[in-house]
Amino acid sequence: MKKVLLCILFLFAAAPQLFAQDNDLLLAKQYAANGDPQKAFDIYQKLYKQNNEEYFTVYMSSLLELKKFDEAVTTAKKMVRKHPEEKQYNITLANAYTQQGQVEKANAIYDDLIKNLPPDQGQISMLASLFYQNANVDYAIKIFLQGRKLLQNEQVFSYELINLYRYKRDKPALVEEYMNFLPTNPPFINQAENTMSNLFEGAADYDILKAALLKRIQKDPQQTIYPELLTWQFLQQRQFDMALNQALALSRRQNDDGANIFELCRTLVSNEAYDAAIRGYEYLVSKGKDNSLYIPSKIELINTKNLRVTSGKYVKEDLISLEKDYIDLLTEFGKNANTVFAMQKLANLQAFKLHKITDAKALLEEAVKIPGVRPVLLASCKLDLGDVSLLDNKPWDATLLYSQVEIDFKNTAVGQDAKYRNAKLAYYTGDFTWAKGQLDVLKAATSQLIANDALNLSLLISDSITADTSGAALKIYARADLALFAEQPEKALITLDSIDVKYPGNSLTDDILMAKARLFIQQKNYADAVPLLKKIAEEHSFDLWADDAVFMLGDIYENQLNDKEKAKIYYQKIITDYAGSLYINEARKRFRVLRGDKNEAAS
């Protein structure tokens, strides 16, 4: 009981002093923050005299800030003598020597610490941590490397060294450390890829990785983690064929089911490397029907060929080959609810690329009669059948199909799409008043794309009718627009050129320019599209298509003409001149990526 009372009395006696020290410490920090280091030092010195150990760090920092180097060295030496086992005081003394300009004395202390490093993993980690806390990353690394030798274990401290090399941005050392680390820790490959993609700044950095990987593969050909990482390296360099070749070689060597190839092909498709993806899917299909990936690979093979065609990266022979692939698929698996997607895509290929309207219409009519088809897919087939009927010059059949879908899918994105197609049909056929009424309703559509398209078409109609109540010029323009939709570029171009001849001074100048630009883009003729878009941006900067033209220029320069600086100019123009544009968020994102913002690039 007496001991308890004595403790309580001691605490009450010490409390005022502790409270005073806390207040002094706060006051010193305030002086330092306000740019008065001398007043802060006076307080730190008083506190240090009261308690050497507790206030040593702040006192030393204050001494060094005021360049009182001799006093700092003397103070640190006292603590080294007082606590020879506490290595942080040695490091603080060395730091004081460094700031005093006596680098050799500092290095002698550091080297002595390394020389007398104990073969104890915990103590090695603690000492390296002390170096890191004192912003001496180089010696922290030396401690870990020496620790490996003492422990006779090249795998220990890998994670710590990876973090230090990343902090130093020492890319060759980071790569080598990952080469050591990953074979025994394969789940960390994604982390390694993310780390390197954030740190690497160009082809030269990736070449460091490539050289290290090729060396390791030659040394240890049975290790699979290196070929996997090499495949990733080729992807980052956009060397898609090389990436696939590497992955195929590994798959053949392992004689696996090709799951990694299947995932790689998805990545290739997302990067529009269609030819490489097709080669990968063909490899998977060649493994035979017994392979679990045979059916999905065959489907994705055809889908990828279709994407190549719809992106414009094809020759006429590709169309014929793709049509045959779809027909073969339907022959192998039959026409049923599971293959309606293929019937739909084949019909679109026949209608818009091969211009086999009769074949496409018959196939879609067959598709919509198949029982058990998912409602949304059935609706999509009906909408496509409506489009084909429009191309077949049967607008009444088209509007009936559009209306069926609109009624069946009220207040949904599919229903709004059907309503928009109905409005577009009316516009094509010259019924502008009815079309505008439907478009004005769609301006509030939940789908931003439909809402924006509806707004643009509504404004086109209203501007043209205001200038010409008969709508004569607009009717010709609508026919050209329909020819563009039907992918009949020659007919569309002739029709567009006829408007100014028949109706000089019409209000459709920027609309005609945009229609021609889109036609040339559809043909991958960017050299002819760019001047037209620039004319819209410069001479019609307040008209309907201005922000579209500016964004399209940015996209062409970035992705087609490989001129990143010009792309940045146009994306910046969207941000500064068209704050209300539909493209504002995408333009901002692309601009930041091109500027080199790492967090945007990673996202």
Image (tube, rainbow, N blue to C red):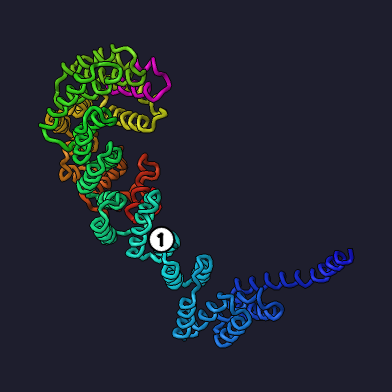
Q: In which quarter of the image is the N terminus?
A: bottom right
Residue 351 versus residue 2 in the image, above or below: above
Q: Is residue 358 above or below residue 97?
A: above
Magenta stretch encompasses residue 356 = no
Q: Residue 412 magenta-drawn?
A: yes
Left or right: 332, with 123 as reference point:
left
Give coordinates of residue 193: x percent, y percent. Answer: 35, 52
What residue span does the magenta drawing correspond to? 403-426
**In screen coordinates, is 259 left or right of 151?**
left
Residue 411 falls in image quadrant: top left
Residue 407 position, x and y percent, is: 38, 15
Q: Residue 355: where, in percent of width, then height?
A: 14, 23
* Amino acid type, mark 1: Gln
Q: Nearer the viewer, residue 583 or 24?
A: 24
- Is disc 1 surrounded by few (<14), some (14 to 19) or many (20+) residues within 10 Å? few
Q: Which residue is drawn at 89% across and 66% down?
A: 2
Up/down of 33 relative to 539, above or below = below
Q: Secondary structure under badge 1?
A: loop
Q: Is residue 515 visible?
A: no
Left or right: residue 88 compared with residue 403: right
User: How many callouts does the rendering have?
Assistant: 1
Q: Quadrant of residue 527?
A: top left
User: Residue, x 23% and y 27% (percent of image)?
Assistant: 289
Q: Could you tell me what secondary structure mostly forms the magenta stretch?
A: helix
The one of 283 and 146 positioned closer to us in this rendering:
146
| Residue at far left of view | 317
Which residue position holds label 1?
A: 155
The image shows residue 303 at horizontal and vertical percentages of 24, 31
Identify which residue, 52 or 161, lies in the foreground: 161
> Residue drawn at (42%, 66%), measured in percent from left and top?
152
Question: Does residue 25 lie above or below 588 as drawn?
Answer: below
